[in-house]
Image: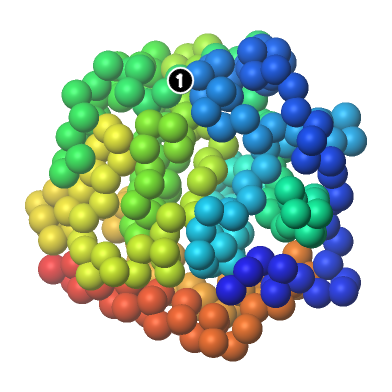
Amino acid sequence: MKIKNLILPETSPIYFNKKNLQNPKKIAKILNINYQIVKTWNNWFYINNKWYYYKNFLQYQNSDEHFLNELIGEFLATFLGLNTINYQIGCTLNCEKEMEYGLLSENFRQKRKKYIVPTDLYLEANCTQLNNLINLKHYCKSNEMYKKLLLQLLKMIALDIYMNQQDRTKNNFLFEKEKNGIILAPLYDYEKSLTITSSTTDSPQYSSCIFGIDMSNYNELVKYPELQNLLQIITTLDINDILDIISNKYKIKIPILQRKKYTEITEKRKKLIRKYLKN
């Protein structure tokens, strides 16, 4: 189904001119982003005196589900107390002069801040163990700072496990440098999860670019009781309540058949998580 089928008469998208593109090098400098990243994902637009990144999902057959997964991810991150990008619905004309809907997120990067790609921390990637969580302690000047960073990352892991996130690559999360260490920058990119990755719902494995965990390995899971607690909390959520909140917030409609699909997948996922939490 197309995103436009979610849009109601009372929906209030932000209209913008998609042709308003600028030089990637100039945008990279303005936004404090690596030039190569902007060159690859040059979807930045200056709207109402602010810079926004636009996700159009046009390359996907199930564009509406990619769209909804992003909004669900935003909700869950906020629920867990994580900093996250906040979406607004964007509307522009495509090359065929038809209305096109997607999601806009305001640039969160500050000019004087340094942002670090995970793999630039020079940690040997291990996508089956969480040992690199301990190794990150080297980048914090105090135990208090490390505990703060650790909690943020455990929240991200819990969120990703619940959503069956399959795309937490080096380009899909960042660290932000502070005086006493590093923290997790606002989280983004939730689309490749849930309904899009339903074929892997039974998998107990989760990995990012520098760490991972197999929930069936209880000896690994038990090392982080806070992660277990977060997983217990997140599995109490009802996806239909989440969809209701999203529907009301963005003034969109979510068809019954789509709700049913999300219900089936999340219940299956929650059952799997609870199975390993009881071991």
Q: Quadrant of the N terminus?
A: bottom right
Which residue does the image show at 51% across and 75% down from the upper left?
239
Residue 169: quarter of image: top left
**In the rendered structure, which amino acid carries the disc numbered 1?**
Ile
Tell how many labels. 1
67 and 130: which one is in front?
Answer: 67
Picture quadrant of residue 54: top right
Residue at position x 70%, y 17% from top? 23
Instruction: Tell me if residue 90 comes above or below residue 201 in the rendering.
Output: above
Q: Toward the viewer: 258 or 2? A: 2
Is 227 rendered above or below residue 267?
A: above
In the picture shown, does residue 93 fall above or below 63? above
Left or right: 49 as drawn, with respect to 43: right
* Secondary structure type for disc 1: strand
Residue 160, image x, y percentages: 39, 53
Question: What residue appears at the point 64 percent right and 25 percent down from the top-left corner?
Answer: 109
Q: Where is residue 46 in the image (x, y as percent from the top left)?
A: 81, 31
Image side of residue 40 versus residue 213, left or right = right
Q: Is residue 91 something that shows in the picture?
A: no
Q: Quadrant of residue 16?
A: top right
What x and y, as percent, mark residue 150? Answer: 37, 36
Q: Which residue is drawn at 31% across and 41% down?
A: 208
Q: Position of residue 273 (x, y in %)?
A: 27, 68
The local crowd at label 1, few if under 14, some if 14 to 19, many if 20 or more residues have their Cα within 10 Å, is some
Q: Taking the image as drawn, is residue 234 in sight?
A: yes
Residue carrying label 1: 116
